[in-house]
């Protein structure tokens, strides 16, 4: 008789014995990756002076990182499933550390752009693999709380980048922004090698090279169009052509994945109502978060008159609320008591209420905005972990890397969509209200062309009204999407429960 297989420590019922220490290590690496999405913004004056960088050079320094990262998320997740998540964590940390060293020592704009692109490759591997490892080492009873802490790091990294960059630049030169990543990468490498168990898809499927190429090209083109839209105009030939290429290539990717035996992304996941509901909600959480932060910075600076650093500090209460509530495990407890659909509905409703409060109460001062930021943070702390858990639980464990890639891709897409849609609503409303003789290319341009203090006051009022309209539009979209996602998830749970009862009754009959 064949001896029973030895229990696997990475899949033990109670979770990995060192799971919380491992979570701390991968969250530290994750935080560094996320900070680098926004940390460079405050160094733009230094880069322009010391590297003689043009405006186009600076844009590429900032965008090369996010563009490469977002384009590779699905491919990175698939690679982690096939070749091993521990291996990909090690590779990601090594590439991120080497890229950070090259960026910190760069002597020209071209060198810094290339280094940032290399960091983006490492970042894509880390973002997807860290979430897959969380799913791997935590059992069902603790997974939602663990994903909540992972999501907390996402929110903190997104909001804290400019603040960290400002602190570093007050004491060191611009290259130190990148060199501080190196100790984190080294600590992460040692900890991953010693602590993280290896896991990969036991089926050993053949690599889907064409699928990887199509998904990378398609996502890169779509994200490039989103990034280029605010500068070149959403209806410009450059943006429309790039977006068209991206959509066509992604359609080709979907068709290819449906017709091969071992797809990188199984398109049949999109027939699962639970997966569809989680996908819709994840896009709209990112939509509300990305679009609202885009509007908030303008609101704080152009309407309330704060400087860049002051504005950044005043958005911090939202991130701090997310951190505080997720550290208490509130979202995880609510999921256990009321279920995922109800938690998502509550979180998305709070996110929408916070956006509406900022629109209605924050127009004339920061006090009303502060209330809205705290409510938004509470909503994000409930909705984001529940959404990520719903996506990951709808995908087989051996495909967790691909699931993490889908989650990351949706966040990138939702952020860009929020900026594009809510920014367009702002511009349309502003153009409709500003005096026709002035024109409304932008608020600074309109103010410069204004004739007298009365006209300038009218222009500022028009811009404030545009912000209010766009924030309310975002609130409506987030609320409707959240309720739709909750409804789809509730229906999927009922279907699963009915199928379970039918299987239980069948043998007895």
Image: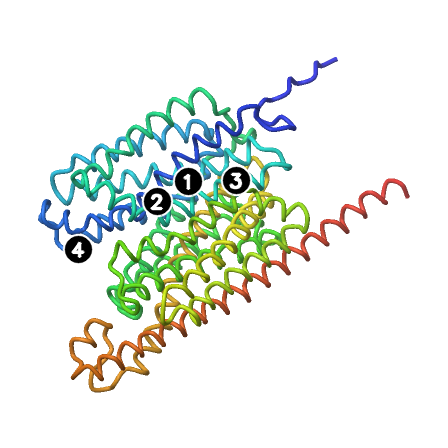
Q: What residue is shown with label 4?
A: 56
Per the model, the C-alpha gap separating discs 4 and 2 is: 20 Å
Question: Mark 1–mark 2 contact, CB under 8 Å?
Answer: yes
Q: What residue is shown with label 3?
A: 262
Place residue 221 in its image quadrant.
bottom left
Per the model, the C-alpha gap separating discs 3 and 1 is: 23 Å
Q: Please tell me whether mark 4 or mark 3 is closer to you in this view.
A: 4
> How far across and down, in percent of the image, does residue 87 sit?
42, 27
Label total for image = 4
> How far across and down, in percent of the image, does residue 368 sit?
42, 66
> How far across and down, in percent of the image, does residue 478 sit?
50, 64
Q: Element at badge 3?
A: loop
Q: What residue is shown with label 1?
A: 127
Vertical placement of residue 42 versus 168, above or below: below
Number of residues whose C-alpha sits closer than 10 Å to that of mark 1, classed few (under 14), some (14–19) or many (20 or more): many
Indicate left or right for 252 with 280 as reference: left
| Residue pictured at 50% horizontal, 69% vertical | 476
> How far across and down, in percent of the image, does residue 430 sit?
31, 77
Per the model, the C-alpha gap separating discs 4 and 3 is: 41 Å
Vertical placement of residue 362 versus 64, above or below: below
Number of residues whose C-alpha sits closer than 10 Å to that of mark 4, classed few (under 14), some (14–19) or many (20 or more): few
Q: Element at badge 1?
A: helix
Indicate left or right for 333 with 102 as reference: right
Vertical placement of residue 125 versus 429, above or below: above
Q: Please tell me whether mark 1 or mark 2 is closer to you in this view.
A: 1
- Give the label on residue 69, or none: 2
User: Looking at this view, is 81 or 404 the one in front?
Assistant: 404
User: Looking at this view, is 419 or 212 the one in front?
Assistant: 419
């Amino acid at each position: 008789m064949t001896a029973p297989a030895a229990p696997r420590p990475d899949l033990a019922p109670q979770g990995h014995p060192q799971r919380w220490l491992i979570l701390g290590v991968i969250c530290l690496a994750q935080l560094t990756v996320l900070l680098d999405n926004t940390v460079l913004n405050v160094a733009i004056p230094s880069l322009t002076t010391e590297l003689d960088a043009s405006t186009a050079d600076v844009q590429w320094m900032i965008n090369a990182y996010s563009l490469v990262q977002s384009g590779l998320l699905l491919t990175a997740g698939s690679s982690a499933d096939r070749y091993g998540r521990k291996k990909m964590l090690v590779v990601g940390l090594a590439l991120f550390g080497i890229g950070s060293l090259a960026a910190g020592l760069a002597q020209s704009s071209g060198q810094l752009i290339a280094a940032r692109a290399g960091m983006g490759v490492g970042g894509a591997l880390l973002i997807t693999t860290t979430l897959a490892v969380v799913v791997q080492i935590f059992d069902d009873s603790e997974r939602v709380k663990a994903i909540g802490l992972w999501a907390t790091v996402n929110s903190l990294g997104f909001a804290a980048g400019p603040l960290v960059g400002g602190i570093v630049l007050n004491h060191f030169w611009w290259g130190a922004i990148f060199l501080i990543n190196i100790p984190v990468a080294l600590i992460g490498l040692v900890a991953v090698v010693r602590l993280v168990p290896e896991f990969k898809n036991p089926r050993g499927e053949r690599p889907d090279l064409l699928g990887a190429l199509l998904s990378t090209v398609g996502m890169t083109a779509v994200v490039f169009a989103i990034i280029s839209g605010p500068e070149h105009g959403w209806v410009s030939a450059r943006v429309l052509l790039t977006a068209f290429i991206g959509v066509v290539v992604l359609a080709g990717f979907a068709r290819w994945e449906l017709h091969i035996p071992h797809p990188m992304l199984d398109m049949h996941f999109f027939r699962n109502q639970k997966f569809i509901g989680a996908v819709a909600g994840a896009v709209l959480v990112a939509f509300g978060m990305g679009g609202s932060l885009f509007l908030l910075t303008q609101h704080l600076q152009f309407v309330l008159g704060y400087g860049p650093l002051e504005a950044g500090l005043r958005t911090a209460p939202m991130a701090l609320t997310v951190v505080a509530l997720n550290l208490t495990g509130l979202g995880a407890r609510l999921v256990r008591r009321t279920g995922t659909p109800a938690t998502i509905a509550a979180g998305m409703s709070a996110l929408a209420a916070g956006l509406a409060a900022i629109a209605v109460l924050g127009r004339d001062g920061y006090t009303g905005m502060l209330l809205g930021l705290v409510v938004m943070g509470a909503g994000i702390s409930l909705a984001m972990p529940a959404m990520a858990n719903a996506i990951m639980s709808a995908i087989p464990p051996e495909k967790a890397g691909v699931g993490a890639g889908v989650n990351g891709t949706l966040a990138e897409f939702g952020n860009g969509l929020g900026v594009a849609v809510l920014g367009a609503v702002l511009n349309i409303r502003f153009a409709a209200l500003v005096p026709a003789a002035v024109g409304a290319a932008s608020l600074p341009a309109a103010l410069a062309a204004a004739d007298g203090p009365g006209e300038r006051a009218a222009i500022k009022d028009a811009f404030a009204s545009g912000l209010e309209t766009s924030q309310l539009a975002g609130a409506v979209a987030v609320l409707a999407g959240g309720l739709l996602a909750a409804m789809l998830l509730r229906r999927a749970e009922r279907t699963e429960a009915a199928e379970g009862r039918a299987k239980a009754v069948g043998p007895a009959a």
